[in-house]
Amino acid sequence: MSTRDLVLTALFAAIIVALGLLPPISLGFIPVPITAQSLGVMMAGVVLGARRGAIAVLIVLLLVAIGLPVLSGGRGGLAIFASPTAGFLVGWIFGAFVTGYLSERLVNHGQSGLVQTVSFFLTAMIGGIVVLYAFGITYLATVAGLGFTKAFVGSMAFIPGDVIKALVAALLGRAVMVGYPLLPARA
Amino acid sequence: MQSLYVEGNSPMHRLSPRVKLVSLAVFGVVLFVSQNIALLSGFVLLTAFVYRTTGLPLGEGLRRLRPVLLTIAVVALFNLLFNPWQAALVPVLRLTALMLFAAAVTATTSITAFIDEVTALARPLERTGFVQADDIGLALGLVLRFVPEIVGRYQAIREAHKARGLKVRPTSLLAPLIILTLRDADNVAAAIDARRIRRHGS
Amino acid sequence: MDIEFEGAGVSFGTRVALAPLTLGISGKRIGVIGLNGSGKTTFARLINGLTKPTVGRVTVNGRDTADEKAAAVDVGFIFQSPQNQIILPIVRDDIAFGLKRRGLSKAEIEAKVAGILARFGAEALADRRAHELSGGELQVAALCSVLVTGPGILILDEPTNQLDLKNRALVERIIAGLPESAIVITHDLELIAGFERVLLFHEGRLAADAPATEAIARYREIAA
Amino acid sequence: MDIEFEGAGVSFGTRVALAPLTLGISGKRIGVIGLNGSGKTTFARLINGLTKPTVGRVTVNGRDTADEKAAAVDVGFIFQSPQNQIILPIVRDDIAFGLKRRGLSKAEIEAKVAGILARFGAEALADRRAHELSGGELQVAALCSVLVTGPGILILDEPTNQLDLKNRALVERIIAGLPESAIVITHDLELIAGFERVLLFHEGRLAADAPATEAIARYREIAA
Ligand SMILES: Nc1ncnc2c1ncn2[C@@H]1O[C@H](COP(=O)(O)OP(=O)(O)OP(=O)(O)O)[C@@H](O)[C@H]1O
Ligand SMILES: Nc1ncnc2c1ncn2[C@@H]1O[C@H](COP(=O)(O)OP(=O)(O)OP(=O)(O)O)[C@@H](O)[C@H]1O
Ligand SMILES: O=C(O)CCCC[C@@H]1SC[C@@H]2NC(=O)N[C@@H]21
Ligand SMILES: [Mg+2]
Ligand SMILES: [Mg+2]
């Protein structure tokens, strides 16, 4: 890994942490909060690509494990990984990876701005929602013992917010493509 | 999380970074298994005391915690909506104690010390052949460095608006913010290479 | 322009960056000099409200600069580091940014952007990405972005940093030809050599308020 | 030192920042001058491998700088913007950072950090946060961070930017007294006035390679 890659992953880890300064919204019917941090996960994938994006998320999880309160609402500590949100947290890694993987393949500099934005939106939806939720819901349903139906239906409450996040990530991905092209420099 | 180190010579400063980091990890687990409100309240008082001993002036100490305190307050409010007050109090006490202790650790552990310690702890992982302990330490240290920087960049962009007599709008904030921090990151990478901080010995 | 410092000072914690200062400034060209860390930038930031005084107040044309609403007062500021000045990633967009918000028509904006770039002979920079520019090119872009809106008072914090002979001469000419008031902070003493009024700061205090030759002589003593 | 450019050039896309250049550099003091954007920084970045040539190669003491492993060659680099030089938030930590990875003992590191700060009379900066420093203070901190490791070759990219008279004189003395080789890029022509060899760049090409007086005269022609 080049120094640049190392620093960029650290930067996006920091962006995810900084997004945690926005308060989470707890829902009564599902023990997982709505948080702005998953926007950072999508952004990491869109801007950094698969490998670096996933590593950025791993760095955040490492900080959580150390006990620094880097998750929204000031949460942190090993205990988090034993809580019902653990599946989503692990899903962040794969969400960033898939978002990045698809972005690397679907988006290039020759395309029009609209095509780039729409492609980024789709990759963020697939990685940051489909893949991410698969992990989160499975864990909630099985390990957390919520049952599949309840886990699935409960998680639908995240959809509106996450679609907006995917849109923001897409606009940002396009803006970075113009102002600071990174994706071609794949790790 | 504000990770600003304060120069000082308090007992927390003198404690080895390893002891602090391991205690933090262990404390995180202990907090999680505790349900007892009295015990958790004790932890809050204790960690508040520890935080006060770091030598941070009271105003500055509170100012640093403000963002996290605010979000904890929001968590508490939501919990109160759905739960009896006892059940709502437990997570608030947990979060507050963890935040106070983590803030005390970060205020008394310089980023250099943090990097060194994480590097030392990660050293055994090198045998897997996947990672360099030096890189893990450096990456985690850089995150702590970047969080305040991102906040600072946000401030700088607001100032750049003001310098031209413009009002700041959130819509024109995010993209410049990310692009500017990306450029900062590139510069930091160049500085690390230029100063041979990473390549040496590897 | 009429700038009044009324016992205005700035401290960061226990560090006094600028001791309370009472001073009136009016006139076309004011120079500001002094050692590193003597308070020059802090002084300038007070004038357009980027920093708020921790004691006293500063008014520009009668309006308190600490008052958010008054901050629209027409003070353009060229930062000491051009890196911090550029907001949008493409030079042309950045220059146009301030104009857009002022509600000018598209054609007017384009004309103004082209005009300011031509003034610096910097047409080639228009479509460049700001982060790819050399240090001096960035400084020129920053100057364009601020000058294009034609601020009534202009503060230039070390504007000739990183500039080559050609651009430095250009900035010197531009300062001389500005229709409005300018406050020029610099370590490049030739730049302010002809100014009638130069403020010398030392350790957060005003150490001289005099014509250039006199203030520069005092500065040389302090620096020796 | 023995630096060899063997047809080395840099393009960014279609933009030629430095046309292919063949040149040998050895000697103690080399000045580099030229207009903004003429390729000075690009030239310097090639020497310590921060930028890789898109054509040709650059060797330092026989080792290719594009080769990651050879990059351990001892080239210190003072960036054009000190903001970019500082890695860690506290000045003292930042200065110590480069030493740590070189395996020095704690006591040695402390002694070296104290030594370099004393050399600049900048002991007061040690425990300051880098982002709170004034521009000139930051430049001094950046100089300390690089000089402390005692690099064999030192590249200074506009080292006197933002410095006051006192610190500027100090940097001039330090350059004169450096035990090792130095390459000094600058727009501050007095700084290199006495150099025996000065490289003048123009539009990405070497336009002169001559003693200071001659190169500066050519530069003035170009800038006129
Ligand atoms: N945010 C801050 N926090 C703490 N100290 C600060 C802050 N900003 C400035 N200072 C300190 O205030 C003093 C005055 O700073 P200022 O930037 O006004 O100096 P200056 O005269 O512009 O110096 P230079 O010529 O180096 O740019 C300096 O010692 C500086 O370190
Ligand atoms: N990453 C990049 N992408 C595209 N163009 C670049 C990049 N870096 C530099 N350039 C261009 O290459 C040219 C040479 O840049 P360089 O930084 O070497 O100039 P310089 O001589 O150091 O100028 P200055 O005196 O302004 O610092 C400039 O026109 C610059 O815009
Ligand atoms: O902070 C945590 O405990 C991690 C929470 C994970 C939240 C998931 S991410 C996808 C989905 N969208 C949200 O807004 N929240 C959940
Ligand atoms: Mg200043
Ligand atoms: Mg340069």
Image: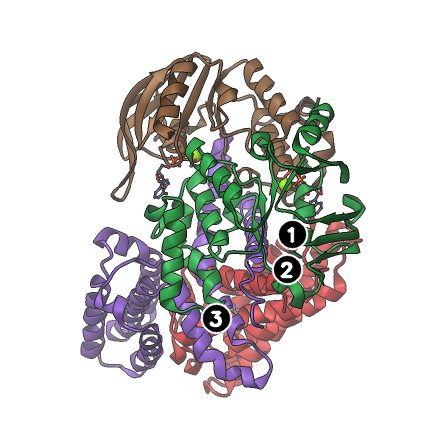
Chain colours: A red, B purple, C brown, D green
Give, as a three-letter code, the residue at label 3: Gly
According to the picture, the residue beneath numbered tag 3 turns out to be B137
Expressed as whole percent of the image width and height from the top left, the position of residue A138 reads 55, 83
Expressed as whole percent of the image width and height from the top left, the position of residue B8 reads 26, 59
Compared to D107, does D25 lie above or below? above
According to the picture, the residue beneath numbered tag 1 turns out to be A176
Q: Residues within 10 Å of mark 3 (few under 14, many from 20)?
A: many
Determine whether the residue tagged by mark 2 lies in a helix, strand or loop: helix
Q: CA distance from mark 3 to mark 2?
A: 23 Å
Q: Residue at x 49, y 58 (%)?
A: D149
Whether residue D92 is visible here, answered yes or no, is yes
Q: Residue at x 40, y 58 (%)?
A: D112
Determine whether the residue tagged by mark 3 lies in a helix, strand or loop: helix
Q: Are marks 3 and 2 in contact (CB under 8 Å)?
A: no
Q: Nearer the viewer, mark 3 or mark 2?
A: 3
Q: CA distance from mark 2 to mark 1?
A: 7 Å
Res D106 → quadrant: bottom left
Callout 3 and callout 1 share a chain: no
- Residue C67 as seen in the image, left or right of residue C119: left
Callout 2 and callout 1 share a chain: yes
Image quadrant occupied by the C terminus of chain D: top right
Determine whether the residue tagged by mark 1 lies in a helix, strand or loop: helix
According to the picture, the residue beneath numbered tag 2 turns out to be A47
Give, as a three-letter code, the residue at label 1: Val
Q: Are marks 2 and 1 in contact (CB under 8 Å)?
A: yes
Q: Residue at x 73, y 51 (%)?
A: A114
Expressed as whole percent of the image width and height from the top left, the position of residue B84 reads 27, 73
Residue closest to the eye, B114 or D70: D70
Compared to A177, does A66 lie above or below? below
Whether residue A73 is visible here, answered yes or no, is no
Compared to B155, does A23 lie above or below? below
Mark closest to the chain's N terminus, 2 or 1: 2
